[in-house]
Image: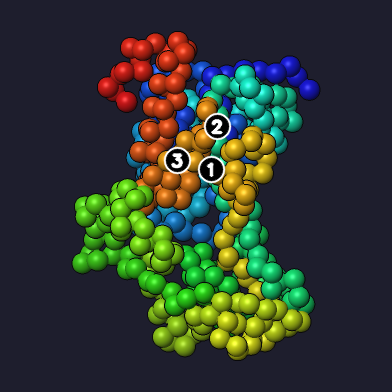
Amino acid sequence: MSAPSATDVLVVGAGQAGLGTAYHLHRAGVRDVLVLEAGEVGQSWLDRWDSLQLFTPRRFSALPGLRFPPGPTPTPSRDEMAGYLRDHARRWGLPVRTGTPVTRLAHDGEGFCAETPAGEVRARHVVVASGAFRRPHVPAAARDLAVPQLHSADYRTPDDVPPGPVLVVGGGNSAAQLAVELSATHDVTVASAREPRYLPARVLGVSLFDWLLVTGVLNADRDRWVTRRARARGDAIVGRELDRLRRRGVLRVLPHRVVTGAGTRVGLSDGSTLEVASVLWCTGFGPGVDWVDVPGALDDDGAPRHDRGAAPVPGLHWMGLPFQTRLNSGLVDGVDRDARRTARRIARALAGSAAVSAETAADPGW
């Protein structure tokens, strides 16, 4: 293992949150920055299913400093998103080191130490932008099922699902997209914890996201009533294709939570049971940051502790968390303001310790 290297700011993750933060750190005059990425830039998108389409229009899928290019569809595909992230990193010459996962992050009182297969990296500040919800979550009912099961994280094409009735479990956009895709080749039933809530992709010919922007909803502060209400109601499905297929009888949607599993039968919260040949779990992800071995950084459930991205541990920062500061913090469109805020906080801290000049830290060009 090589000798430890050192940097002022270590950014873990070269997805949209990590690249957006590195961009704003550069603009803030912070030059000693290193971004570590476990795979390649954009890999997290390429690891999703082949037909994935973002539900945000191209304009709202861009990072600061680079317009999202036009394309054949209103929203980008996963391949386009991965390519865009690579272009963004190249366009701004961001200091990304690929193929370098961080296996442990510790704090020794003098600074942070990130362990990687290539050696240790020491840093004064660390931005964890690797995605706080990366570990696939599968309900306990899965343990007693004797049928093929797959989480959306491992699904690529309909060929991954055996023939016969498939139960798609989940009520968000992933479940909706995959249920629609599978309905062309399988007998599909969707089990959702509640009646799905649909939002139109366009209203009066204008993108839903443009309406949300001009009304102030999209950038609403996390403490505003509209954000609290959206968070309490859970994910809404953008687009109505799932509902159209349901009304045509192509597939079924049952607004009941999966509570039990036994052999080839699944029990729902209304007391009914279903015979299934396979199950596709679109049930989201749990915290995947157990490699952060810093006292005070995580709560009892292993989730990040923070106040608008700032951890209670000085020098530790989180980026890309849902509702981090605003309603759209978890979307690509929400990276800009959150990344700018994080970069300012870091630049001021470094300026206070004479690592960056006070003149640079006060630059209104941020």
Q: Residue at x 74, y 31 (%)?
A: 117
Residue drawn where x is 39% and y is 72% of the image: 197
Q: Picture coordinates of residue 209 (x, y %)?
A: 30, 56
Label 3 crowding class (10 Å Cα cut-off): few <14, some 14-19, many 20+? few
Could you tell whether 326 is left or right of 242 in the image?
left
Task: State how many labels appear.
Answer: 3
Left or right of 229? Residue 98 is right
CA distance separating discs 2 and 3: 11 Å
Give the answer, above or below, for where 315 lies relative to 215.
above
Nearest the viewer among 216 and 251 is 216
The answer to whether residue 101 of the structure is visible from this angle is no
Residue type at the position of mark 2? Val
User: Residue type at mark 1?
Assistant: Arg
Question: Of helix, strand and loop, which one carries label 2?
Answer: loop
Cα–Cα span, label 2 and label 1:
9 Å
Closer-to-camera residue (298/365): 298
**Residue 28 seen in the figure:** yes
Indicate the secondary structure of the residue bearing disc 3. loop
Q: Residue at x 58, y 65 (%)?
A: 283
Q: Amino acid at mark 3?
A: Asp
Query: Which circle marks residue 305 in the picture?
Result: 1
Residue on which the image places disc 3: 307
Figure quadrant of the N terminus: top right
Circle number at residue 313: 2
- Please provide percent x and percent y for residue 31: 47, 18
Q: How is the image coloured?
A: rainbow
- Mark positioned earlier in the residue sequence (2 or 1): 1
Mark 3 and 1 residues: CB-CB less than 8 Å, in contact? no
Residue positioned 40% across, 80% down in the render: 244
Q: Nearer the viewer, residue 267 or 304?
A: 304
